[in-house]
Amino acid sequence: MPHNIYKVTDFELVAPFTLRIRFDDDSQRTVNFEPVLAGEIYGALNDPEFFRQVRIDPEIRTLVWP
């Protein structure tokens, strides 16, 4: 079964660790990332200042952090 891959076109920080994300099909979702901010891979994002450094990668159009 094929899965569509949507590109991020915009986002807004709406609460700590929560982003409203708009996609290239004009849909938008509000995602609270806090429940997954643990462990080796995502634990660094649990720092509010670091989390706010989120950007859209201009090439692959997904959310990225430094």
Image: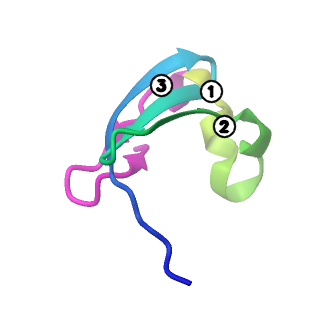
Label 3 sits on residue? 52
Q: Secondary structure at mark 1?
A: loop
Q: Is residue 20 above or below residue 41?
A: above
N-terminal label among 3 and 2:
2
Q: Secondary structure at mark 2?
A: loop
N-terminal label among 1 and 3:
1
Q: Amino acid at mark 1?
A: Phe
Q: Looking at this rendering, what residue extends furthest in the top direction?
A: 15
Q: Quadrant of the C terminus?
A: top left
Instruction: Label the magenta part by its dominant secondary structure.
Output: loop
User: Residue 29 magenta-drawn?
Assistant: no
Range shown magenta: 49-66
Where residue 34 sits, quadrant-wise, is top right
Label 2 sits on residue? 33
N-terminal label among 2 and 1:
1
Where residue 55 sits, quadrant-wise, is top left
From the image, state whether disc 3 or disc 2 is nearer to you.
2
Cα distance in 3D space between marks 1 and 3? 8 Å
| Residue at figure coordinates x 60%, y 22% from the top left | 48
Q: Is residue 53 left or right of residue 45?
A: left
| Residue at figure coordinates x 30%, y 47% from the top left | 24
